[in-house]
Image (cartoon, rainbow, N blue to C red):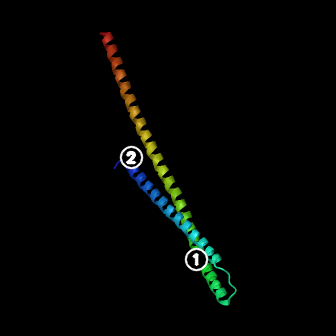
Amino acid sequence: MSDRSTLEVLARLRRQELDATRQALARVEQSIATSQSERRSVWLVADMMEFEASGHALHGRGMLLAAARARSTQLADEIRVLEGLRDGLLAKAKLDLAGCRQIELVAERRALTERRAQLLHQQHATDERTMYRTALCHELAKS
């Protein structure tokens, strides 16, 4: 396998990794938004319950508030975990992007080197033809 095709394969794999990381990042962002929305909803429902003076209603409200607090704490923990995952995915995406760019730069440098070698070869061939013609003209002029 040539260097160029190896670099193309590496670049393609790195881009696929980057795409997968971006997709995972989008899913995590959506999960964070969903959890934050649910957390707000838990407290909205608890706040909407009418306040009644009776003992039974107070007990029910207390239980609802305890459940809301427990669920909110659970969601807050989940959000923290998701945010940590998001931060890790962002770091990975940056590394993937840098890796893609590095491979592209190496491929570009190699292509430029190959083009330079090709141009040098063409220039050398042109110089040889010119020298041959000049030598031929001198030989013909002597005769």
Q: Does residue 10 lie above or below 24 as drawn?
A: above
Q: Position of residue 21 (x, y in %)?
A: 48, 60
In this rendering, the answer to whether 44 lies above or below 127 is below
Q: Which of the marked residues, 2 or 1, is nearer the chain's N terminus? A: 2
Helix, strand or loop at mark 1: helix
User: Could you tell me the amino acid type at mark 1?
Assistant: Gln
- The relative height of residue 2 versus residue 75 in the rendered view (above or below) is above
The residue sitting at 41% across, 32% down in the picture is 120
Look at mark 1 in the image and give the residue it sits on.
74
Query: In the image, what residue type sits under mark 2?
Result: Arg
> Which residue is the extreme one toward the left?
143
Q: Is 121 on the left-hand or right-hand side of 62?
A: left
Residue plotted at (64% across, 83% down): 61
Where does label 2 land, which residue?
Answer: 4
* Residue at 37% over, 48% down: 5
Q: Nearer the viewer, residue 78 or 8?
A: 78
